[in-house]
Amino acid sequence: MYDVVIIGAGVIGGMIARALSRYDLKICVLEKENDVAMGSTKANSAIIHAGFDAPVGSLKAKLNVQGSQMMESVCKELGVKYIRNGSLVVGFNDTDLKTILDLYNRGKKNGVNGLKILNSEELHELEPALSRSAHFALYAPTGAIVCPYGLAVAAIGNAMDNGAELKCNYNVKSITKTDLGFEVSSYTEKVSTKYIINCAGLFADEVSALANDSSFTIRPRKGEYILLDKECGKTVTHTIFGPPSSMGKGILVSPTVDGNLLLGPTSVDFNEKDNKDTTQVGLSSIQSKACEYLATVPTGKNITSFCGLRAVGSTGDFIIESPQKGFINVAGIESPGLSASPAIAEYVVDMLKDSGIVMHKKKKYISTRPSATRFRDASLEEKNKMISDNPAYGKIVCRCEKITEGEILDALRTNPKATDLDGIKRRTRAQMGRCQGGFCTPYIIELIARENGISFESVTKFGANSAVITGKTKGNPNL
Amino acid sequence: MKDLVIIGGGPAGMSAALSAFDCGIKDILILERDSHLGGVLQQCIHNGFGLQKFGEELTGPEYAFRYEEKIIKSGIEVKLNTMVLDITEDKTVTATNPHDGIFQIKAKAVILAMGCRERPRGALNIAGSRPAGIFTAGTAQKLVNTKGLLPGKSVVILGSGDIGLIMAKRLTLEGAKVKGVFELMPYSGGLARNIQQCLNDFNIPLRLSHTVVEVHGKERVEGITVAEVDEKRVPIESTKEFIPCDTLLLSVGLIPENELSKSANVKISPVTNGALVDQNRQTSVSGIFACGNVLHVHDLVDFVSDEAEIAGKSAAKYINNDLSDSTEINIFTDGKIRYTVPQRITDLTDVKVYFRVNNIYKNVNIKVTDGINTLLTKKRPKVSPGEMESVTLKNDHLKNVKELHFSLEVV
Amino acid sequence: MEKILTCIVCPLGCELCIDLEGKEIIEIKGNTCNRGKIYAENECISPKRTVTSTVKCTDGSLLSVKTDQPIPKEKVFDCMKIINQTTATLPVNIGDVIVKDVFGSNIVATQNKN
C-alpha cells in the first residue's frame, strides 16, 4: 500500500514526487510511456516565464511568479542547466505598444520584479540582431531558460534517490475506491494507495473521470518548433516574444541552455491527444514569423523540427483541487506550467498536509542530485581524473555534442534509467546534435542492448513498437 | 611537439600521412576517432574503388587496407579511438581517448582530414511524425554491413546520392524490399553506373523531381507521402501519393565536418562548406592544410587520395620552410560553375583546378580567363553536378595574372 | 535493333550504344575503353555481376566478402543464399577463399579479421 500514487511522470509529477519525497511517505509514480518526460514536458519552449502574462489574481499568476523565483535554486540542487537570460516582448506598432503597457502593468500587479519598457535604441543595443521594425519591448530580467526534460528526469531521479518508485508503461485504466483509499489498475497491474495525485497532463481529464470527476476537460493545442544548429545559438541572447494573442504568447526566438536556437511554437487547437505530427504549414509559418522578428534569419541551419501538445484546461486557469478526499487533480498545466512547477509542488504538499495525512520529514533526505552534465562541465584536470578512474569517459560516442560513453552508461544506470534511444538523447544529448544521431546511433543501440542484456532487435526509439532494428541480415530463412 | 598532426585516419588522412612521410617527414601523428583506420571505407563493402589509383576494382575495406598496410610498415604513429576536441590557430591540438585522457600536442603543421557527415531529416523540414525507422543511408550502411542488422523490411529512399543507390542494392541483397528512390532534382546525384547496377538490375524505380512531404506512423514508420515537385522544387498538391513502408532512408547530401576547422579560425567557403584553400591545399591559416571530404565532397575515393597526396607533400614543404608563395591569384566562378578547388593560387606552377557545375549541361565550353584574355578553353560533351570536372592550368597561364575567372558556355 | 546501356565497369558510366541483330552484335559505340566493349558484349549475351556482402564469423562478428569474379546476373540471389549460410572460421586474411567455386567464382574475404 502506497501513501501517495502520482499519475504522470512529466515535470509536474516529477516535481511533486520530489517535494513529497522529503517526507516519510511511500510514493509511486505511474507513467504510461516507456520513459519519464514523454508528454508536454519534452516538447515545449523551455522558458521560465517572469510572470507578467497570466491574469491578475489567477493561480497561474501566483504560482508562475513563485515558481520562477524558486527555479534557479531548484535547478542548482538538481544539477539542471538554468540560464537567466531575460526575456523581451517586442512590439512593432501602436497596438503592440498598448499590449506591452498592459503586460507591464499586469506584471507589476503579479509581483514581477525589474520589468522595464525599452525604447528602440535600448532594445537594439540589447539585441542587435532584431528587425529594425521592432520599436520597443517589455524587458523582464527574471525571464530564464531551462532544460524541461532534464528537470523532469532530475526531479524524478532525486525522488527515487529518496525512496520513491517509478513504474513506466503503466497505463491507468481504472481507479476504484476502497476502504483505505484507492486501487489504481492498468490492464496488467494493480496498486493500492491512500492518496492519488493526478498529473496526467493531456489525459488528466480522463484520469479524473476514472475517479468520477468530469468537471473539466483538457484540449490539446499543437505547438511546432524548429531547432537550429549551435552555430546560430548566439543570434539572440534573450528570449524574444512577439506580442501575445488569445492563442498564447506567440512565436518566440530563443537560445536554449545547450546553445542551440529555438524557433516556435505554432498554436493550433486540435482534437487528437496523440498526434504530434509536424505540418508543412506550421513549419513554414515559423520560418516566416522569425523573419519578422530578426534582421537576418540563419538559413540552412535547421537540424530538427518537432511538435508538442499543450494541455489546455477548460477553466482557463490551472486546475489544482481535490474533488474528493484523497484525490487531487493537478490539471490544465499549460504555460506557464514549467515555470510554476516548483511552486505547484509546494502548493500540492500543502494541500496534502491540510487533508490530514501524517507527514514527517525524512531524517536522511538527499536534496541534491549529481548533474548529468558533470563530466562536460568539469575542468580539464577533473576530466582526466574521471577518465583515469573510468576510461569510458575518454571515449567520445556522439561526436557532434562530444558525449562520452561514460555519460551514456551513466544514463543507463542512474535513476530514472534510460532504456531507449530517446531516453539516452534526453539525458545526455547524444544524437541531439547536428548529425541527429547519424554516426552514434548504431553504437548506442549496442550499449543499450549490452547494458540491459537484450537483443539489438529489442532496442527501441521510445518503447512499445518503436524498435529500431527489424532483424538480422544473415541466416534469414526467407532469402 | 610534433612535426605533423593529421586529424582523421580515413583515406585522406592515410594518404596525406604517407606522402608527407615519403617527403622526409617522419615525426607524424594520425588521430583517428574510430577503432580502426580507413574511416567510412570500412563500411563501404561494395566494389568500385581504386580503378583510377590501382587500376583494379576494390571494395572499400580492400582499398583502405592498401594504405593501412603502408602506414603500419612506415611506423607512422596512430592513435585510435581518439577524438580531437579543439584545434587552435597556433596549431595546438586537444584530443581525448580512454588511454591517455585529454591531452594537447603542438604541431608544426596540421592536416585536416575529418571527412563529412550526412544531412539529417531536420535539415529538410519534412513534416509528419517522428517514429523509429528513419535513417540516413550511411547509418543504415553501418548497421547492415558492419553489424549485420537490418534497419527495415520495406524501404523508401529519398535522394539518389551514391550511398542511397548503393544501399538500395545492399538492402535488396540482404533481404529487404526497396520500393523506390525519390529524387528532388530532375537528375540523379549519383553515378550512372550505380543507377544501372543498384536500381535497374533490381527493378527499383527512380523517380526524379519527387520528394517526401510527410512521414506517417506513430511508433514505427508506416508509410510516407511523396509528391512531384515543380520547377521551383515546390511539391505539387495533386500529385501526392501514399507509399506504405517501414523505413525511410535519407541520402540527401553530405556536409564537410568543419567544426574543428572553425575553432582554428580557418575560413570556410559557404559553397563547399569546406576550407578555402590554395593549390597546396593550405587553408587561410598558415600551416593548416585540408584534404578529402572535409574540404569538399568527392565522387571517388581515388580523387580523395590524390588530393591528400598534395596536402601531405605541401605540409612537408611547409615544415621544411620550403613552401613558396610568389603570387596571389583568386579564382572566381560564374555560378554555372559552383565552385573550384583550390579557390586561390599562390605560386607560379602547374595547377589542376577541380570544379563542380550547378546543373546538367550538354556540349559545353569551359573557359578560363584572367578577366580580359581567355587563357584556356576545354570542350566537354556533358557535365553534371554529380561529377567533378577539372582543368589543368600551366605555369605559363599564370604569369602576370591577378585573378582567374571560370565560366561555362553552352555551345 | 539498338540497345542503350550504362557501362558499370568504372565510375565514368559511359553510355553504350549496341547495334544488335538478334543475338549478334554488329557494332558497339560510346565505350571509351576496351573493358567497356567487353562489358557491352557480356551484357548482351550473358550479363555478369560482382557480388559483395558479408558472412558470419565463428565469433559472431561479420566479415566482408566478394565474389572474386563476376558471376551470372541471374545467379546473384542464389549466391546470396550460399553467402548467408556460410560461417567463416577466424582468423581470416584479406583475399582468403571463404567458399570455393560459386557459379564460376570464389567468395573471398575483403578484410582481415583475427
Image (cartoon, grey):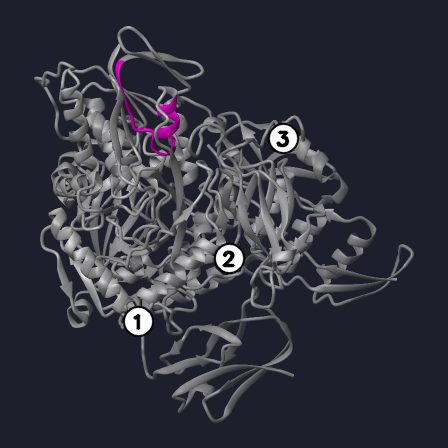
Q: Amino acid at mark 3?
A: Asn
Mark 3 closeness class: few <14, some 14–19, many ≥20 residues within 10 Å: many
Q: Tell me which segment is drawn in magenta.
A: A194-209
> Residue at position x 65%, y 26% from top?
A477
Front one among A267 and B75: A267
Q: Is residue B154 left or right of residue A147?
A: right
> Which image quadrant: the N terminus of chain C?
bottom right
Mark 2 closeness class: few <14, some 14–19, many ≥20 residues within 10 Å: many
Cα–Cα span, label 1 and label 3: 51 Å
Q: Which residue carries the number 3 mark? A: C84
The label shown at residue C92 is none
Q: Which residue carries the number 1 mark? A: B284
Residue A202 covered by magenta stretch: yes
Q: Which residue carries the number 2 mark? A: B301
> Residue at position x 21%, y 14% from top?
A26
Mark 2 secondary-structure assignment = helix
Front one among A223 and A479: A223
Mark 1 secondary-structure assignment = loop
Residue B3, picture quadrant: bottom left
Are the residues under marks 2 and 1 on the same chain? yes
